[in-house]
Image: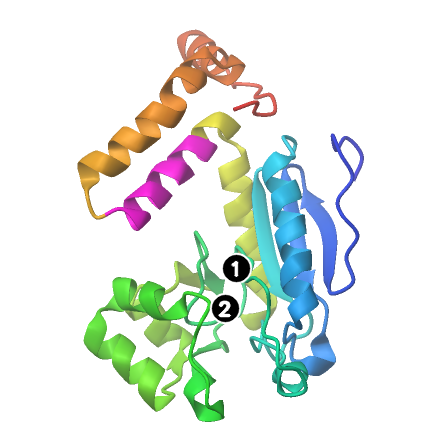
């Protein structure tokens, strides 16, 4: 993609593309391994999303898995069984296609054929990358316990009913297009407004206190937001009843 302020880092396991302006598509490219992630892929993902966070021309990241069988089977157990060392880190990915139950995504669009679960106990492990507390916060202790301790797998419709996903696509083939439509809606708004709004939501996720979450977001961003060029663009466009022409964020 031309117009990037800096080139993306090299990638072996993750394929990068740019389907729409301001949108990054990251594809886990290990279809034969059901897109299971080796330890090196976690570092690779961390590097890519650190670059994404610093790249002002991009606003939304979509993550999907190659093929139609699985978004991501989790950690590569074959590699893990042959090594005493576990992964050094676990990158937080914005999953929007065939996601695992413990996803940390902001939004999730699921194929109607997608299944959701935390199967780690079946191989003597546990969901160590944050899936357990995320699942418990979203659906509660009892149901999270059943899913995590019995290996129960949820259908896409069940995941929608339990508020684990935003929507289920009309067909398996349309899941990416529907996800991209959602991303395009987001990129039509002020990048500064989107960034601060997302931060406010994440602060609320991480903090039990509404007042504390609100205060942290205000302290970190409000002055820079109001002083930014996009705030002026938005106010002027509103007053003139015209379509705003946003510029890359410099928050």
Helix, strand or loop for disc 2: loop
* Residue under label 1: 96
Report if residue 192 is visible in the image.
yes
**x and y, in percent, of residue 109 in the image:** 48, 61
* 22 in relation to 251, above or below: below
Helix, strand or loop for disc 1: loop
**x and y, in percent, of residue 101 in the image:** 42, 71
Q: Is residue 62 left or right of residue 162?
A: right
> Are the residues at dot 2 and dot 1 in contact (C-beta closer than 8 Å)?
yes
Q: Estimate how packed mark 2 is, as few (under 14), some (14 to 19) or many (20 or more) residues with alpha carbons within 10 Å.
A: many
Residue at image position (47%, 71%) is 100
Q: Main secondary structure of the magenta part?
A: helix
Report if residue 190 is visible in the image.
no
The answer for how far apart the CA atoms under marks 2 and 1 are is 7 Å
13 inside magenta stretch: no
Residue at image position (53%, 13%) is 229
| Span shown in magenta | 194-207
Residue 162's image quarter? bottom left
**x and y, in percent, of residue 31 in the image:** 71, 76
* 78 in relation to 134, above or below: below
Q: Estimate how packed mark 1 is, as few (under 14), some (14 to 19) or many (20 or more) residues with alpha carbons within 10 Å.
A: many
* Residue under label 2: 99
Q: Nearer the viewer, residue 50 or 239?
A: 50
**x and y, in percent, of residue 199 in the image:** 40, 38
Residue at image position (63%, 37%) is 22
Q: Is residue 122 left or right of residue 29?
A: left
Residue at image position (44%, 72%) is 128
- Could you tell me which quadrant the N terminus lies in? top right
Q: Nearer the viewer, residue 227 or 153?
A: 227
201 inside magenta stretch: yes
Q: Is residue 137 left or right of residue 59?
A: left
Residue 152's image quarter? bottom left
């Amino acid at each position: 993609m031309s117009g990037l302020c800096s080139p993306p880092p090299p990638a072996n396991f993750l394929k990068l593309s740019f389907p729409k302006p301001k949108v990054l598509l990251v594809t886990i490219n290990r279809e034969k391994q059901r897109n299971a992630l080796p330890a090196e892929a976690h570092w690779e993902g961390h590097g890519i999303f650190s670059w994404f966070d610093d790249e002002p021309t991009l606003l939304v990241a979509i993550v999907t898995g190659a093929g139609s069988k699985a978004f991501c089977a989790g950690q590569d157990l074959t590699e893990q069984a042959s090594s005493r060392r576990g992964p050094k880190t676990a990158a937080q990915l914005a999953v929007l296609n065939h996601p695992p139950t413990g996803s940390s995504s902001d939004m999730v669009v699921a194929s109607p054929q997608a299944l959701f679960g935390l199967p780690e106990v079946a191989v003597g492990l546990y969901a160590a990358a944050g899936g357990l507390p995320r699942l418990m916060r979203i659906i509660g202790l009892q149901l999270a316990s059943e899913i995590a301790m019995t290996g129960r797998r949820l259908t896409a419709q069940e995941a929608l009913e339990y508020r684990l996903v935003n929507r289920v696509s009309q067909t398996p083939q349309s899941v990416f297009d529907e996800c991209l439509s959602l991303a395009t809606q987001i990129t039509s708004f002020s990048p500064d407004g989107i960034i601060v709004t997302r931060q406010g939501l994440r602060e609320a996720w991480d903090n039990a206190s509404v007042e504390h979450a609100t205060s942290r977001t205000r302290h970190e961003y409000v002055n820079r937001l109001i002083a930014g060029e996009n705030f002026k663009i938005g106010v002027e466009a509103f007053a003139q009843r015209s379509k705003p022409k946003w510029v890359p964020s410099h928050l």
